[in-house]
């Protein structure tokens, strides 16, 4: 999709506001999601282009290169596009208004045409797990129907909704008006419910894990709770700075085209609140230690790391003698 708003609306840079409005009207009616000829990406891009070019300030900023224009896609721009469309036409359903206007000459003698039925718009809260795996859900929708005595009656209708794997936030599901309904079509807009640990960003998933300082320095093995209930093992074998983002390719949301997004894991390194004298001494020694040690030096250090914190003088003497003997034996074997 072009990132030139003039090209998206098929107009010239010299076009006036009336030209811009005519172009948007034509393209939006042709590509609207409710039309058989729907082109969702083109519909969303046209709405974004219209918003930029119909606003004198935004248009001037774009033409002076101080405002960058990037056409959104149906995945991230549908809610804004639908609002722009409704604001432009002054109605949620301009198609019925167009049809009414076209037939007004035939019915003018009978009085004004009745107002089109109002569309029922509701949000459909869906768990991240259902958006991830797909499945069915239900929604109670308030509607108005014509009662047997001709009086309008308010009631709730339960509608069954099939959610495809990877359905995007802001996607809409439409149910046609039934015979006897006073209200019009029902349009449900998908809204993702918050997940305890995961955040969705397009087709990607994002989460944060706490990593103790020891693991940040020596490597970490952790688990991430996935939307479908699985636990995904995360292994990072490197020194981890705080804020480091580990990406697991293909572990994000499934997309409608069959591909998958990625999982981004941000590491929050947790420092200890305090260290005792021995811990500070050992940590300082370890960080100052040369990378290449002889085997007997490594053995002595490992022995020291596994010693209990409190030793008697006799135990310290015995350990010292054992360490000296071990170092001497290693040296003899090397010869």
Image (cartoon, rainbow, N blue to C red):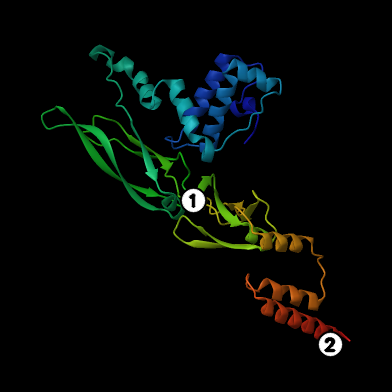
The answer to whether 168 appears left or right of 220 in the picture is left
Q: Which residue is mark 2?
A: 333
Q: Write the residue at 54% across / 44% down.
A: 202
Which quarter shows the C terminus? bottom right
The answer to which image quadrant residue 310 occupies is: bottom right
Nearest to the observer: residue 104 or residue 20: 20
- Cβ atoms under marks 2 and 1 closer than 8 Å: no
Tag 1's secondary structure? loop
| Residue 175, x across and y down, in percent | 33, 39
Earlier-in-chain disc, 2 versus 1: 1
Quarter occupied by the N terminus:
top right
Quarter of the rendering containing residue 180? top left
Above or below residue 243? Residue 78 is: above
For the residues labelled 2 and 1, the Cα–Cα distance comes to 54 Å
- Res. 185 image quadrant: top left
Q: Mark yes or no: residue 234 visible.
A: no
Q: Residue at left 37%, top 41%?
A: 124
Q: Residue at x 56, y 28 (%)?
A: 48
Number of disc labels: 2
Q: Residues within 10 Å of mark 1 (few under 14, many from 20)?
A: few
**Mark 2 Cα shell of 10 Å, populated few (<14), some (14-19), many (≥20):** few
Could you tell me which secondary element the residue under label 2 belongs to?
Answer: helix
Q: In the image, is 71 to the left or to the right of 304?
A: left
Percent from the top left, x then y, of residue 282? Answer: 71, 64
Depth check, front residue: 328 or 197: 328
Nearer the viewer's eye, disc 2 or disc 1? 2
**Residue 258 at least partly seen:** yes
Q: Report x, y in % for residue 234.
A: 58, 61
Image coords of residue 80 (percent x, y): 49, 30
What residue sits right under mark 1 in the picture? Answer: 197
């Amino acid at each position: 999709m072009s990132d030139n708003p003039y090209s998206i609306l098929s107009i010239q840079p010299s076009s006036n506001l009336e030209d811009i409005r005519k172009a948007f009207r034509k393209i939006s009616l042709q590509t609207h999601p409710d039309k058989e000829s729907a082109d969702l990406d083109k519909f969303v891009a046209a709405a974004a282009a219209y918003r930029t070019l119909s606003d004198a300030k935004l248009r001037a900023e774009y033409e002076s290169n101080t405002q960058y224009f990037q056409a959104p896609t149906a995945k991230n721009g549908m809610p804004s596009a639908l609002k722009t469309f409704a604001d432009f036409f002054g109605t949620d359903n301009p198609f019925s208004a167009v049809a009414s206007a076209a037939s007004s000459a035939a019915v003018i003698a009978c009085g004004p045409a009745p107002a089109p039925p109002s569309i029922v718009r509701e949000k459909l809260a869906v768990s991240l797990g259902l958006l991830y795996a797909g499945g069915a859900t239900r929604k109670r929708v308030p509607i108005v129907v014509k009662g047997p005595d001709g009086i309008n009656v308010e009631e709730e209708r339960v509608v069954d909704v099939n959610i495809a794997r990877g359905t995007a936030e802001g996607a809409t599901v439409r149910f046609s008006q039934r015979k006897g309904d006073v209200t019009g079509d029902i349009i449900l807009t998908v809204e993702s419910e918050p997940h305890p640990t995961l955040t969705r960003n397009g087709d990607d998933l994002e989460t944060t894990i706490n990593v103790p300082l020891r693991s940040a320095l020596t490597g970490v093995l952790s688990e991430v709770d996935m939307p479908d209930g699985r636990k995904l093992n995360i292994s990072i074998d490197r020194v981890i700075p705080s804020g480091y983002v580990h990406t697991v390719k293909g572990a994000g949301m499934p997309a409608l085209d069959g591909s998958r997004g990625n999982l981004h894991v941000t590491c929050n390194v947790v420092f200890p609140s305090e260290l005792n004298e021995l811990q500070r001494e050992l940590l300082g020694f370890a960080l100052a230690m040369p990378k290449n040690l002889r085997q007997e030096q490594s053995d002595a250090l490992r022995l020291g790391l596994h010693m209990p914190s409190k030793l008697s003088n006799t135990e310290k003497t015995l350990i010292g003698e054992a360490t000296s003997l071990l170092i001497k034996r290693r040296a003899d074997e090397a010869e």
